[in-house]
Image (cartoon, rainbow, N blue to C red):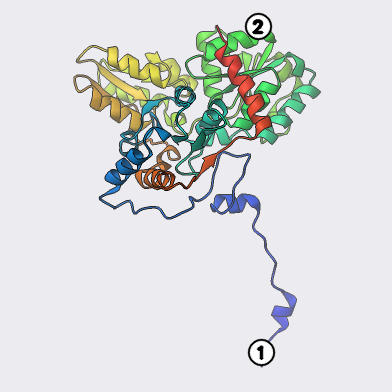
Amino acid sequence: MRDVTTAQARPELDVQPTPLALLLLGREADPRSERGVECPGDLPSPSDPDLVERARAAKEKLGDKVFVLGHHYQRDEVIQFADVTGDSFKLAKDAAARPEAEYIVFCGVHFMAESADILTSEDQKVVLPDLAAGCSMADMATAEQVAECWDVLSEAGIAEQVVPVSYMNSSADIKAFTGKHGGTICTSSNAKRALDWAFEQGEKVLFLPDQHLGRNTAVREMGMSLDDCVLYNPHKPNGGLSVEQLRDAKMILWRGHCSVHGRFSLDSVDDVRERIPGVNVLVHPECKHEVVAAADYVGSTEYIIKTLEAAPAGSKWAIGTELNLVRRVANAHPDKEIVFLDKTVCFCSTMNRIDLPHLVWALESLAEGNLVNRIQVDKETESFAKLALERMLALP
C-alpha cells in the first residue's frame, strides 16, 4: 500500500526562480544592467572553415551601409573586419562621423554600443553581435544603487557640494545620472581634466564606477593623499561610511573595478623586474594603486600603443593590460621585447564573447534585411547621458 503520509505532509513547493537567477542562467534580460542574454538565431559553427569568407562576403554585400567598429581588446579573428579600431569613446565618435552608415556593428561590449547609439543619428542602428557581451565594471554600479548613494549624500548634507564624474565604462543610466546632477564623463586619458573641471564646480567628487582610475588620478596627478579618498560600498548601509568620513573626503570612490586590470599585483611587477633586467613596466590606470605606483609608465590604451610605437629597438617592456592587445602590439614590434605583465592569462571574458560566429551571424542577418541585436537607449536617458558627454567634449 502506498504511503501518502510524507507526500501529504510535504506538498510540492511552487518555486519560482528569481529574476536574478534567470539572468544568471541567461534566460532573462535586465534592462538596467550591462549583462545581456542568449543570442537569438542560429549561429554558424565555430569550426566552419568558411567563416572568414562568409564574413567578408556579407560585409561586401552591405557595402557602405555597414560600419564595423573594433575595440582594441577584441581577438584578431574579429578585429580583421573592423573598419576602425580604438578605445570605446574614439569608436563612438568615429561612428557618429559616418552618418551614411545605416548599421553600426560594434565589436565591443554593451556600454560602448550604448554610447555609440547616443552619439549617432536616429537613422543609424547600432548592433552588438552578442548581447551577453557586457562589462563587469559597468555592472558594479546600477541606477538604483547610485540613486541610493545620492540619498546618502543628501542626508549627510553634502550632495550640493558633490559633482559626479563617471568613467566612460559605465551604463547609459549612470551617464544619464551624471548629466542630470551636473557632472561629466571622463576617459582614462582625460580623467585629470575632468576632475579639474569638477573641482571648479564643487568641493567633492563622486567618481563612478572604477575606484582605481579615480584614486590613481587624484593621488598621482592631482597631489591628493590617499586619506582624501574614501570608498563607497553600495552593498553596505550608507556605503560603509560615516557622515564624518563623507564630509571630510574630497574623492568619494565607488567600489568598482575592472576584472582584467584588477588582477595585476605588486608581485607581478617585482617578478617581471627580476626575470627581465632593464624592463620598462607600462600599465593602465585601471590597475591597483600599488601597481601603478611601482610602474615606470602609466596611461590609457592609446597611450600604451603610442609609447610602444615610439620606443627604441631592443627595449624591453612588460605591459599591464588586456592580453589580446598585448599580443597584437608585440607582433607589430618584433624589434622590441614586449611581454604580458602577469604569468596568468588575462583576457576580458565579456569582450571575447564577440567571436567570429557571432559577427558572421550579425553581418549575414543584416545583409538579408534582418535587424538583430539592436542597442537602443530610450530618449530621456539619452538626453541626460548626452549632456554629460557633451560636457566632457567641452573640457579645455
Disc sitting over residue 378 in the figure:
none
Left/right of residue 301 with respect to residue 3 in the rendered view? left
Q: Quadrant of the C terminus?
A: top right
Looking at the image, residue 179 lies above or below residue 132: above
Q: Residue at x 59, y 8 (%)?
A: 196
In this rendering, the label closer to the viewer, 2 or 1: 2
**SS for dot 1:** loop
Sequence-first tag of 2 and 1: 1
Q: Residue at x 53, y 48 (%)?
A: 37
Q: Position of residue 47 (x, y in %)?
A: 29, 52
Q: Quadrant of the N terminus?
A: bottom right
One can see residue 225 in this view: no
- Give the labeled residue for mark 2: 200
Q: Position of residue 213 (x, y in %)?
A: 52, 20
Q: Residue at x 64, y 9 (%)?
A: 199
- Give the labeled residue for mark 1: 2
Q: Quadrant of residue 333?
A: top left
Left/right of residue 386 with respect to residue 129 in the rendered view? right
Q: Gap in Å between the C-alphas at discs 2 and 1? A: 79 Å
Which of the two residues, 169 or 317, is positioned nearer the viewer here? 169
Which of the two residues, 225 or 120, is positioned nearer the viewer here? 120
**How many labels, in total?**
2
Q: How dense is the environment of label 1, judged by Cα within 10 Å: few (below 14), some, or many (20 and up)?
A: few
Q: How dense is the environment of label 2, judged by Cα within 10 Å: few (below 14), some, or many (20 and up)?
A: few
Looking at the image, residue 257 lies above or below residue 60: above
Q: Residue at x 51, y 19 (%)?
A: 187
Identify the amino acid type marked 2. Glu
